[in-house]
Structure formats: structure tokens, C-alpha cells
Amino acid sequence: MSISPVLQVRALSKAYTTQPVLSDVSLHLGPGERIALTGPSGSGKTTLLNCLGGVDRPDRGEIQFLQYDLVRLSSDALAEVRRAHIGTIFQFFHLLPTLTAYENVELPLQLLDVSREERASRVRGLLARVGLESRASAYPGQLSGGEQQRIAVARALVHRPALILADEPTGNLDSVNGTAVLALLRQLTDETSTALVLVTHSEEAAAICHRVVHLRDGRIARVGSIEGNPRPASV
């Protein structure tokens, strides 16, 4: 039985004023598949990620995510899809400083009106998985950079999204913490069959993915497979 793609992008184009940023970009992503978006600064990586997450709207093209046509959804419907089905990880963590680690991870579930008992079960389980159960009551300012990013990974996964969008998630970490976060992302997306789009300049980060999509001047310059990382059988 064939399994539907999580994400299909066809002929996507985007310009700011008269400056093209993306031109005729097409790609697809299956359940549990990880792709790295690479390329020089200004090549369109972050703009593409923003379009995939519904933050920016393309000028032309299609984005089919699960059963949703993201390009044609209203702003309110797009926000609902993001809240329910997409997790995001940023370079600078973006944790809320007035919430504890536990509360930061719990927040997506509160926005979805998940019951208190289910929230507690999921949050505690993920805090244990990322090795920070003992830091549940700590505030972001009391956590190291590596700990903050692990909390951000837990927050991105807690509502069981179909897709995670990660923008340079190890760019603000030292090599030891960066390696740990990458291993965690690889392990957890494998276990949950969550698709991942990872923007990175790092060869080490790209190496956890199944494919690398290299952008140049807003176009896909090449697509390559990562040796030793066969794509999931469902793709």
C-alpha cells in the first residue's frame, strides 16, 4: 500500500519587491524522511522554510501539506494547521523566559486544549527522553544553551506533528552540544516517523538527513542522497 507524502512542493516562486528569492522550486518529503536545505547565504533557504511553515506566502506554486493546500488557506486556517501539525526549532531557541522548561514544552498542548492528564504524560515523557526531567522547574535563563535547545526539541515534538522545520538548530551551540542535539533529532524523528526539513550550513547536521537539497540563487542546484542513510521504506 502506498503512503501519501507529508509534503509536496511544486514550482514555488517568491520575490520581495522586484528581487526574486525563490524560482521554480519543487520537492517532496515522506513520513520520517529528513532533508537538509543547504546553500550560501541569500540562496533562499530561510524563505523556503518560511513558505513551508506558512509564515510567508509564495507568489506562485503549490504547497500540499498532508491534506491541506497551504497556499490557498486563509490566515486563520493556516495558523490552525501550523499549531496542530508543524513543529519549529530555531537557532536561538525562542523559549519563553517567564515559563519553566516544563511550561515551555507544555505550551503547544495548551493551545490545542489537550487535557491536563495527557499534557502531563507527554511533557514528562519527552523531558525524560531529552535527559532533562530533573530540570523541569528551571527557567530558560537557568539552562545552558544545549539544555535550552533540547527543551526546544521537546517542545517541537510534544504535539506529535507530521513535520518539523528546523532553522540552523545547532548554529548557536558548541560542537559537543550540537552533536547531542543532532543525535536526539535523528533518534526521535526515526521513532515517531516525523518528517524534518533542516536548514543548515553544517556538514555534520546535514549528515543526519536522508537527502540534501542545495539551493543557489533561489533555485535547486542539486539534490543528493547521504551515503549510509537510506530513505525510510514508506517514502
Image: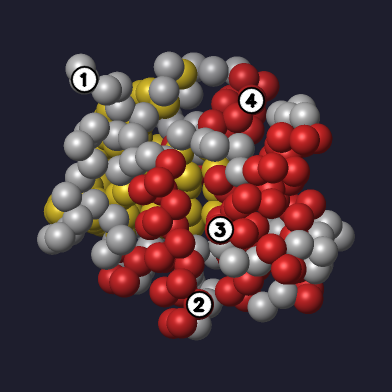
Report, in whole angstroms, how far the alpha carbon at label 1 lies from the one at label 2.
38 Å
Q: What element does badge 2 sit on?
A: helix
The tag on residue 2 is 1
Residue 188 image point, x, y percent: 44, 52
Q: Quadrant of residue 127?
A: bottom right
Query: Which of the marked residues, 1 or 3, is nearer the chain's N terminus?
Result: 1
How far, Cα to Cα, is label 3 from label 4?
A: 27 Å
How far apart marks 2 and 3 lie (CA) works out to 16 Å
- N-terminal of the two: label 2 or label 3? 3
State which tag comes first along the sequence, 4 or 1.
1
Does 16 sit left or right of 120 as displayed?
left
In front: label 2 or label 3: 3
Q: Do labels 2 and 4 touch, CB within 8 Å?
A: no
Q: Position of residue 129 (x, y in %)?
A: 56, 58
Tell me which label, 3 or 4, sits earlier in the chain: 4
Measured along the vertical axis of the image, is residue 30 above or below residue 210? above
Q: Which residue is mark 4?
A: 80
Q: Secondary structure at mark 3?
A: helix
C-alpha distance separating marks 4 and 1: 27 Å
Q: Which residue is mark 3?
A: 129
Q: Say few, some or many: other residues with alpha carbon within 10 Å of mark 1 (under 14 / 14 to 19 / 20 or more).
A: few
